[in-house]
Image (cartoon, helix red, strand yellow):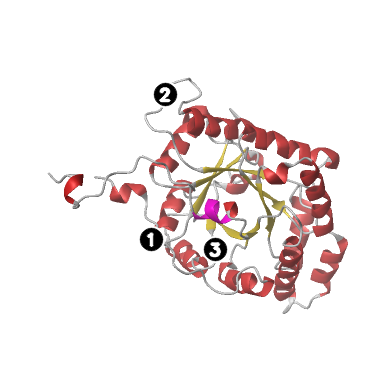
């Protein structure tokens, strides 16, 4: 047995790290953060998921792994997070209320902490009627605000909703989602305040195509002082085709595409429409960076992940790859 006095084994520190992870550190230091969304595969093969991860690894601060998004069944999000850790990427585990009761939700949160996932993004979830199992029974035992409060209680008070004490408090940065464009517009900033009061520390928004409208929402957010209490990352998704534009306008509720953006997409040639969508996104990032209270951007680029470095470079958000990245390994890999 070694002892700490002979210099062969340093004393174990009981002090918790200052930051939950790299994303938290970057946000806390006032640096512009860049995150991206990755959907786990609809199957058991991981090749395409790993390739997408490697294409963005040196350019992103963290990557969201979705949780059966749009009510379509996919590989479990926690499994995707473990894969990202293996690939050297800090994960953000999305967790939604549709498919789980409060027992399962708390279990998932503890599992995330146990394998070293440093960020969670908590959502209510799309109704199952929109997905590939419309006959499934939705649970909705809690909504997103209640789940955020639950996570804060587990972390701060080291207990479950039942009152049972946890042996060790979990550690993750707590995130939520907000839609600046949903009606009634006048109360959207106040709704963000409810999530912040419940415990949300960062927010990723619904897709932003109308930057001036988003800027008005941010003015309301600043007037209420919420930008000082929560990190705000608007979400962007390059439009790849006229068909994709029409799908957003007709099928996806809560997404607003202004006329000038729609005209640019419809006016582009078939060969240039994808490039035009990327140009619109680059311009939006540049404009969003100038809005006070915006702490970074979140990108959704399904099938275009390899264009993420180009997008970050062209927008001025990141001119070169990140260096000095720490080796990220699941906590269980080092466990006895």
Name the residue beneath numbered marker 2: 165
Please tell me how crowded label 3 is: few (under 14), some (14-19), or many (20+) other residues with Cα within 10 Å. Answer: many
Please tell me how crowded label 1 is: few (under 14), some (14-19), or many (20+) other residues with Cα within 10 Å. Answer: few
Q: Residue at x 65, y 44 (%)?
A: 230
Whichever of labels 3 and 1 marks the residue nearer the N terminus, that label is 3
What segment carries the magenta color? 22-26
Which residue is the extreme one toward the right? 259
72 vs 20, left or right, is right
Whole-angstrom CA distance, mark 3 to mark 1, is 15 Å
What numbered label is drawn on residue 60? Answer: 3
Whole-angstrom CA distance, mark 2 to mark 1, is 32 Å
Name the residue beneath numbered marker 1: 327
Disc 2 element: loop
Which residue is the extreme one toward the front? 5
Residue 196, compared with residue 326, is above or below; it is: above
Would you identify the image quadrant in which residue 275 lies?
bottom right
Residue 169, compared with residue 40, is above or below; it is: above
Residue 135, compared with residue 325, is above or below; it is: above
311 vs 41, left or right, is right
Whichever of labels 3 and 2 marks the residue nearer the N terminus, that label is 3
Whichever of labels 2 and 1 marks the residue nearer the N terminus, that label is 2
Image coords of residue 9 (percent x, y): 21, 50
Whole-angstrom CA distance, mark 3 to mark 2, is 36 Å
Tally of numbered discs: 3
């Amino acid at each position: 047995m070694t002892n700490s006095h002979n210099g062969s084994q340093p004393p174990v520190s009981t002090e918790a790290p200052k930051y939950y992870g790299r994303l938290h550190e970057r946000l806390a230091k006032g640096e512009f953060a860049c995150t991206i969304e990755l959907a786990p595969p609809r199957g058991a093969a991981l090749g395409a998921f790993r390739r997408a991860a490697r294409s963005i690894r040196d350019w992103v601060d963290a990557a969201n792994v979705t949780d059966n998004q749009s009510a379509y069944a996919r590989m479990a999000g926690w499994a995707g997070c473990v894969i990202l850790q293996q690939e050297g990427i800090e994960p953000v585990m999305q967790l939604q209320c549709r498919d789980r009761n409060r027992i399962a939700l708390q279990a998932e949160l503890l599992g995330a902490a146990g394998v070293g996932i440093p960020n969670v993004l908590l959502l209510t979830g799309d109704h199952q009627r929109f997905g590939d199992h419309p006959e499934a029974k939705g649970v909705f035992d809690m909504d997103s605000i209640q789940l955020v409060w639950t996570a804060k209680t587990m972390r701060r008070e080291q207990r479950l909703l039942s009152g049972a004490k946890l042996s060790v408090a979990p550690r993750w940065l707590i995130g939520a989602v907000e839609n600046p464009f949903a009606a009634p517009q006048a109360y959207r900033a106040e709704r963000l305040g409810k999530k912040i009061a419940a415990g949300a520390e960062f927010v990723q928004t619904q897709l932003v195509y109308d930057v001036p409208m988003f800027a008005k929402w941010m003015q309301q957010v600043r007037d209420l002082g919420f930008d000082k209490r929560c990190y705000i990352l608007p979400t962007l998704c390059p439009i790849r085709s006229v068909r994709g534009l029409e799908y957003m306008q007709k099928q996806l509720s809560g997404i607003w595409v202004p006329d000038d953006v729609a005209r640019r997409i419809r006016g582009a040639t078939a060969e240039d429409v994808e490039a035009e969508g990327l140009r619109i996104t680059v311009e939006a990032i540049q404009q969003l960076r100038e809005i006070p209270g915006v702490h970074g951007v979140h990108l959704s680029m399904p099938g275009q992940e390899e264009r993420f470095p180009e997008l970050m470079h062209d927008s001025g958000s990141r001119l070169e790859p990140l260096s000095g990245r720490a080796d990220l390994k699941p906590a269980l890999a080092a466990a006895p």
